[in-house]
Image (tube, rainbow, N blue to C red):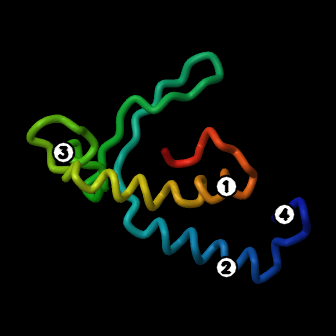
């Protein structure tokens, strides 16, 4: 925004408001490994984390209802299937 001369625009104000709002629950610590000019996250901890191991795994006894997967895949795949049909790409058509 600065480089393009947009610092004093409503776009900058709107983006700043979005960032402020979206980060209000962000808290915690992150551990980093710095080595030869690279940076790698090696740990993170937050009291308000959205990560749940039970939802992120697909083992027996997990929390995720796997019967929801086919519907989710179908709905999220609609744009790709539509694009394939419009572009005539037969390898992506439903079988």
Mark 1 or mark 4, earlier in chain: 4
x and y percent of residue 48 in the render?
28, 59
Mark 1 residue element: helix
User: At which x and y percent is residue 37?
Assistant: 65, 22
Which image quadrant for residue 61?
top left
- Residue at horizontal 62 percent and vertical 16 percent from the top: 36
Q: Name the residue that disc number 3 marks.
A: 54
Q: From the viewer's perspective, is 50 left or right of 2?
A: left
Please say if the residues under marks 1 and 2 sit with CB atoms less than 8 Å apart: no
Asked if residue 61 is positioned above or below residue 1 in the image, the reply reads above
> Do the residues under discs 3 and 2 have CB atoms within 8 angstroms?
no
Mark 1 — residue?
85
Q: Residue at x 36, y 45 (%)?
A: 29
Q: Which residue reaches farthest front?
A: 95
Nearest to viewer (mark 3 / mark 4): 3
Residue that badge 2 annotates: 14
């Amino acid at each position: 925004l600065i480089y393009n001369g947009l610092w004093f625009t409503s776009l900058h104000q709107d983006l700043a408001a979005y960032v402020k709002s979206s980060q209000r629950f962000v808290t915690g610590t992150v551990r980093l490994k710095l080595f030869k000019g690279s940076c790698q996250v090696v740990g993170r901890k937050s009291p308000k984390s959205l990560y749940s191991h039970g939802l992120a795994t697909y083992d027996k006894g997990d929390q995720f209802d796997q019967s929801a997967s086919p519907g989710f895949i179908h709905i999220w795949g609609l744009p790709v299937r539509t694009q394939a049909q419009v572009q005539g790409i037969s390898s992506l058509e439903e079988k």
